[in-house]
Amino acid sequence: MSVTVKDLIAHLDGAIPFSWAEPWDRVGLLVGSSSERVGRVLVTLDPTHAALGRAAEAGATVLLTHHPAFLEPFERLTWSGDDPDLAIEALRTGVALIACHTNLDRAPEGAEALPAILGLEVIAPLERGQQDVSAIVVYAPAEAAERVFTVMEEAGAGRIGQYGGCAFVARGQGRFTPRFGARPRSGEPGQPTVVDECRIEMVCSPQRAPSVIDAVRAAHPYEEPVVLSSRSGLSRGAARMGRLCRPDAPVDVRGLAGLVGERLGVHCTVWGDPGRAVSMVAVAPGSGRSLVDDAIAGGADTFVTGELRYHEALDAVEAGLAVIEAGHDATEWPLTGALARIACRMAGLAEDAVVLDESDHSWWTT
């Protein structure tokens, strides 16, 4: 069975939907052709020239990373001398660049990768609040409802956390009077008409709403289908960043910092009373700045993360939250293992097709 880049993208989107990513993020296929065949896949943290070289050495046609190759749109792509842009080099070498960033952060398998390395017991997700969604409401004749629901799902609607095909469907009566010149499916011009209809409600990411609406209009049997779309907020479920955890043995802040440093191979920066007992730990890899308030609201007394800004750390300590910073990359390398396992589950890929890169820290301490 020949697997294409498009197939791999579909697999990743099914396992860790790209719609879970932050609006500012760049995820999915960023560079390359979706029709190219997937030979091997190198999974690593950062898309760098060195990683691109390792992908070529491994015979990989896909470089699958946590961090995206770029966040801002290109104004121009140029090449001067022997130092081409990463995107140009990837195109030249035939290696597709795919990123799973904040969607992987929110995936349960990604969010629990760091607590597993640290030996912490996961209690609950950390991130609170709502995710931005579009609510799509469609009225369709009862006999066409299943078809309309199917095309909505295929266009990306109905995914909520770990569940797909989520919809509310209610039966009722549709009433209308076709005007002269109309070509109604039921009834006659000028005559009030009553038909059995279904109201179908589904949610999707705002980015996918236009595609869902287009799919409905193409499949709907009415000349003038009623398709309503509104922006809303959906309470977050399984797809949430960070985790609230408990240590498996009594420990203070100094001891936990030592454990984190030992497990990740780094020297941690610690804020707060080193002798304070730890009972509830908030864990968020990478930059944890957006989750400080959630950690406090969740009852955590200690926050293990990659990095905070100086004043953010001061404010956290003032609020009673000790902070252990272990480095952005060191806390996110465990997510690459989760990403590799997710890629390995794709049907059609050979057992040795997915190669996990070796972790490497580009910084050091004296």
Image (cartoon, helix red, strand yellow):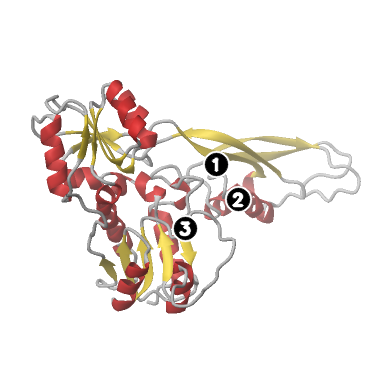
Label tally: 3
Q: Secondary structure at mark 1?
A: strand
Q: Does 14 appear above or below 56?
A: above
Residue pushed farthest top?
Answer: 319
Nearer-the-camera pick, 135 or 177: 135
Question: Which residue is tagged 3?
Answer: 70
Neighbours of disc 2 within 10 Å: few (<14), some (14-19), many (20+): many
Are dots 2 and 3 in contact, CB under 8 Å?
no
Q: Does 250 appear above or below 200?
A: above
Residue 363 at what x, y percent from top left?
25, 54
Are dots 1 and 2 in contact, CB under 8 Å?
yes
Question: Which residue is tagged 1?
Answer: 202
Quick one: quadrant of the N terminus?
bottom left
Q: CA distance from mark 3 to mark 1?
A: 32 Å
Q: Amino acid at mark 3?
A: Phe
Question: Which residue is tagged 2?
Answer: 212
Residue 352 at what x, y percent from top left?
25, 72
Nearer-the-camera pick, 263 or 208: 263
Mark closest to the chain's N terminus, 1 or 2: 1
Q: Residue at x 26, y 65 (%)?
A: 357
Q: Secondary structure at mark 3?
A: loop
Neighbours of disc 1 within 10 Å: few (<14), some (14-19), many (20+): many
Residue pushed farthest front?
Answer: 366
